[in-house]
Amino acid sequence: MEDWQSFLSPYKQAVEELKVKLKGMRGQFELQSSHSPIEFVTGRVKPIASILDKAQNKGIPLDKLELEMQDIAGLRMMCQFVDDISRVVELLRKRNDFEIVEERNYISNKKKSGYRSYHMVIRYPVQTINGEKKILVEIQIRTLAMNFWATIEHSLNYKYKGQFPKDIQMRLQRAAEAAFRLDEEMSLIRGEIQEAQAFFSSKKES
Ligand code: 0O2
């Protein structure tokens, strides 16, 4: 690749713009004083070394990066509860500032590693001085527990280059199950809180 700066420039712009937009959704829930399904939002442009690694591993020629690498620009939306994820997905589907290319549900179909998350790949138009450029952006939507697990697993993966010793692999599987149970417990607690709230507000009205 001759000029990484200009290749990555629209990706940087897309990440910055989408961070503002998606964080804005959280702000709107706050204004309404209603529970925000979005806890926080992060974004990054994939480092050049990771782009090169991934291109090599997946056999993507460098002149096909734009079409074939979907996560050079990446956004992450963290939610408190599993149910919030589908609300966020619905909100994203209703937007008209991008087009959805693909959705991958690694929550109902968790990965072999134990990874859970909802992925949405979008085609996002960036306005440049040379006209509009549409680029692919991957949005990952996950709970705080899913994010905790994925962050730790990702850094261990980096250390062991994907070749985990058996005991660590087993512990990661167990940690993934624990994160799953944590999400389930929190959903049950949430359900009970909402039931109690509904009960008290109906009592007040009568
Ligand atoms: P980084 O450093 O986060 O950018 P595939 O090889 O088909 O599984 P593909 O086609 O790139 O992967 O798409 P997929 O599966 O949607 O994964 C893209 C991103 O999801 C990854 O980017 C990770 O961010 C995350 N991800 C997927 N699987 C795992 C996993 O097992 N553990 C963790 N921690 N994250 C995962 P990169 O490029 O791998 O990494």
Image (cartoon, rainbow, N blue to C red):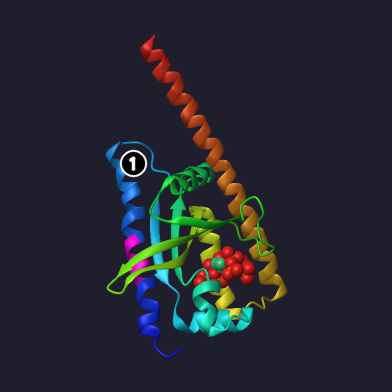
Q: Which range is magenta?
A: 12-17
155 over 29 or under it: above or below = below
Is residue 170 at least partly visible in the picture?
Answer: yes
**Most foreground residue, 120 or 124:** 124
Q: Is residue 81 left or right of residue 25?
A: right
Please name the residue shown 41% across and 48% down the image: 95
Within 10 angstroms of label 1, few (less than 14), some, or many (20 or more) residues? some
| Residue 15 among magenta residues | yes
Which residue is identified by label 1? Answer: 29
Image x and y of residue 108, in percent:
65, 50
121 over 73 or under it: above or below = above
Is residue 154 at least partly visible in the picture?
Answer: no
Image x and y of residue 24, in percent:
31, 51
**Most foreground residue, 86 or 96:** 96
State the residue lying farthest toward the top: 206
Looking at the image, in which quadrant does ligand 1 appear?
Answer: bottom right
Name the amino acid, label 1.
Answer: Phe
Image x and y of residue 14, in percent:
36, 66
| Residue 26 among magenta residues | no
Q: Secondary structure at mark 1?
A: helix
In the picture, residue 154 is in which quadrant?
A: bottom right
Classify the position of the C terminus by image quarter.
top left
State the residue lying farthest toward the front: 131
Please name the residue shown 51% across and 47% down the image: 85
